[in-house]
C-alpha cells in the first residue's frame, strides 16, 4: 500500500513539474479565462442592473461568475491530451506491461496537472476580487462546504476526462471528442448561463448528469441558495458521480484493451 501511494505521489509531482515548465500556459490561461470572466461580468451587470433575474442579483452574479472561472480553470486547464496520445500513438501497449494500474496512474497525473492551474486561478480570483468586490460566502460553513465541492471536482473531472479519452480506442482523433465534452460541460454545468435561467425540463436533464457539480453546486452552496441539508445532499451526489465514473471507466477500459489498435507509424 505504501509503495502504491509513493508511486501516486511521484506521478503527481512529475505531472505538476511538467506543467510548470511551460509558464506561458499560466498567462495564456489567465488572459483567456480572465478575459471571458470580464466579459461575463459586464454582460450580467448590464442585464441585471439593480434588479434580479431568476433569483440572482448583481452581488450574487459576481460571486457566481468568479466561481465559474475557478472551476473552468481547473477543469479545462488540466492535461487530457497526454492520456489520449498514449492510446492513439500506441504507448498504451507499453503501459499494459508495467506493474502499475493504468487508470490510477493517469488519475495521479491528472491531479498533478490540475494542481498546476492553481497560480492562474489565484491570480484571476485576486484580480476579480479587487475589481468587482463580490460578496463572501453566506456563512462560514457554506464557505467550507464550497471548498469541499471544489476538492470533489478533482476526481469528478478526471472521471469525465478519462472516459472521453477512452473513446480514442475506437476513433483516430481526439480533438472532436474534447470539443464535445467541453461544450456539454460548459452548457450543462451552468458555466455559460445559470441553470436557473433554463426551462424546467432542461434543468431536469442537466441535474440527471454530473455537469452541474462543476459550477452550479459550489455556487449554490456559497451563495446560500440551499440550506445545510441541501448542501450536504449536493456534495453526496457529487461524490457519488465521482465514484460511479471511476467504476464506469474501469469497466470501459477492461473492454477496450481486449483489442488494441495502434494508429500511426
Image: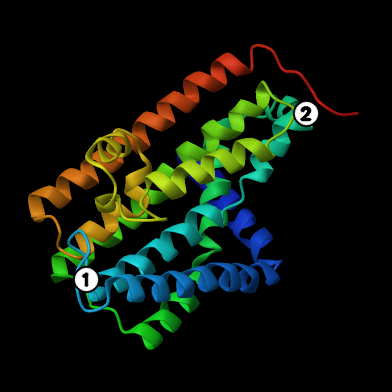
At x 54%, y 54%, the residue is 76
In this picture, is 166 found above or below 69? above
* Number of numbered discs: 2
At x 17%, y 62%, the residue is 55
Residue lying at the far bottom of the rendered structure:
130
Which x, y percent locates residue 84? 67, 37
Of labels 2 and 1, earlier in sequence is: 1
- In depth, the one of 27 and 101 nearer the eye is 27
In this picture, is 102 found above or below 60? above
In this picture, is 193 found above or below 171? below
Q: Disc 2 marks which residue?
A: 90
Q: Quadrant of residue 151?
A: bottom left
At x 61%, y 70%, the residue is 26
Q: Left of 26 or right of it: where is 50?
A: left
Which x, y percent locates residue 114? 52, 56
- In depth, the one of 40 and 5 nearer the eye is 40
State the scheme by which the image is colored: rainbow
At x 47%, y 58%, the residue is 72
Amino acid at each position: 500500500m505504501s509503495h502504491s501511494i509513493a508511486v501516486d505521489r511521484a506521478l503527481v509531482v512529475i505531472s505538476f513539474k511538467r506543467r510548470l515548465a511551460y509558464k506561458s500556459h499560466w498567462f495564456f490561461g489567465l488572459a483567456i479565462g480572465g478575459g471571458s470572466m470580464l466579459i461575463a461580468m459586464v454582460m450580467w451587470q448590464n442585464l441585471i442592473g439593480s434588479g434580479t433575474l431568476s433569483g440572482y442579483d448583481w452581488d450574487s452574479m459576481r460571486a457566481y461568475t468568479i466561481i465559474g472561472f475557478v472551476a473552468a480553470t481547473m477543469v479545462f486547464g488540466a492535461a487530457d491530451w497526454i492520456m489520449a496520445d498514449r492510446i492513439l500513438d500506441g504507448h498504451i501497449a507499453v503501459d499494459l506491461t508495467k506493474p502499475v494500474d493504468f487508470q490510477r496512474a493517469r488519475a495521479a497525473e491528472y491531479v498533478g496537472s490540475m494542481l498546476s492551474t492553481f497560480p492562474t486561478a489565484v491570480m484571476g480570483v485576486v484580480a476579480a476580487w479587487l475589481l468587482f468586490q463580490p460578496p463572501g460566502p453566506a456563512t462560514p460553513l457554506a464557505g467550507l462546504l464550497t471548498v469541499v465541492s471544489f476538492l470533489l471536482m478533482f476526481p469528478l473531472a478526471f472521471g469525465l476526462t478519462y472516459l472521453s479519452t477512452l473513446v480514442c480506442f475506437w476513433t483516430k482523433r481526439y480533438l472532436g471528442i474534447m470539443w464535445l465534452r467541453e461544450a456539454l460541460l460548459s452548457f450543462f454545468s451552468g458555466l455559460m448561463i445559470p441553470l436557473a435561467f433554463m426551462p424546467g425540463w432542461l434543468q431536469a436533464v442537466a441535474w440527471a448528469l454530473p455537469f452541474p457539480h462543476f459550477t452550479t453546486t459550489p455556487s449554490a452552496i456559497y451563495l446560500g441558495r440551499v440550506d445545510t441539508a441541501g448542501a450536504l445532499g449536493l456534495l453526496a451526489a457529487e461524490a457519488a458521480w465521482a465514484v460511479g465514473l471511476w467504476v464506469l471507466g474501469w469497466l470501459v477500459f477492461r473492454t477496450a484493451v481486449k483489442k488494441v489498435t495502434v494508429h500511426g507509424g
